[in-house]
Image (cartoon, grey):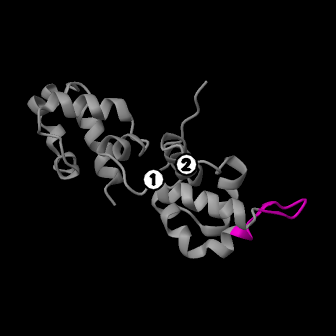
Amino acid sequence: MIIECRNSECSKKSTGKIRRWIASLDILGIGDVVLESMIERFDLADAGDLYTLRDRAEELANLVTHTERELRLGEKRATSILNAIDASRTLTLSQLLGSLGIDHLGKRRVELMIQSAQGALDTLEAWRSRLLRDPDAAVQAGVPNIGGQIQDGIDAMAP
């Protein structure tokens, strides 16, 4: 069974997108407990907020992960997490788009669409240009029936 929330303001939905980003890019050290603690403490709204944590390294080191035992993350683990986040700052187009949690769009599909589109989808600007709304372009990219849905997802993630 899959439970899906359609409320765009749902906090758990943004948590899921951050979790997907972390898993997709193999950012090590951030499990469910640490992620939930980070979201609560740092008010993370999306995956982009992970990249602001370097400025809060001391706070991250003091992050309480298990309140019942007052366990803190610690400086060494915080540094490891920040280094793993920093390692994911430079991404390929397929890594970026495929990790956003957009329906019908994973890293492999982005790669296949780039190949099929023969240069028409080689840049982020091209993906954001609403090209996939054009039925002919969607066919060329190999997504004739879902090009509009993919474009909706990209448009929603634009901010």
In the rendered image, residue 66 lying in the magenta stretch gets the answer yes
The residue segment tinted magenta is: 61-72
Q: Nearer the viewer, residue 56 or 148?
A: 56
The three-letter amino acid code for the residue at tag 2 is Ile
Where residue 7 appears, x then y in whole percent? 50, 48
User: Which element is circle 1 on?
Assistant: loop
Residue 89 shown left or right of residue 43 in the figure? left
What residue did someone put label 2 on?
Answer: 27
The answer to whether 13 is drawn above or below residue 61 in the figure is: above
Task: Tell whether position 34 is magenta.
Answer: no
Instruction: Check contact, mark 1 vs mark 2: CB within 8 A.
Output: yes
For mark 2, give the secondary structure: loop
Residue 116, horizontal then vertical, whole percent:
17, 27
Nearer to the camera, 68 or 147: 68
Instruction: Locate residue 135, reporting x and y percent.
Output: 12, 31
Residue 50 seen in this snapshot: yes
In the image, residue 91 above or below residue 61: above
Could you tell me how far apart the alpha carbons at marks 1 and 2 are, in whole angstroms? 7 Å
Crowding at dot 2, Cα within 10 Å, few <14 / some 14-19 / many 20+, comes out as: many
Q: Horizontal placement of 16 versus 140: left or right?
A: right
The single residue placed furthest to the left in the displayed view is 136
Label 1 environment density (alpha carbons within 10 Å; few <14, some 14–19, many ≥20) = some
Tell me the residue at 52%/57% (across/down): 85
Q: Can I make out residue 39 in this image?
A: no
Q: Say which quarter of the image contains residue 39.
A: bottom right
Q: Which residue is mark 1?
A: 88
Give the amino acid at mark 1.
Answer: Ser
Residue at 63% x, 64% y is: 79
The residue at the far right in this view is 69
> 96 left or right of 69?
left
Residue 48 location, quadrant = bottom left
* Residue sitting at x 34%, y 61%: 159
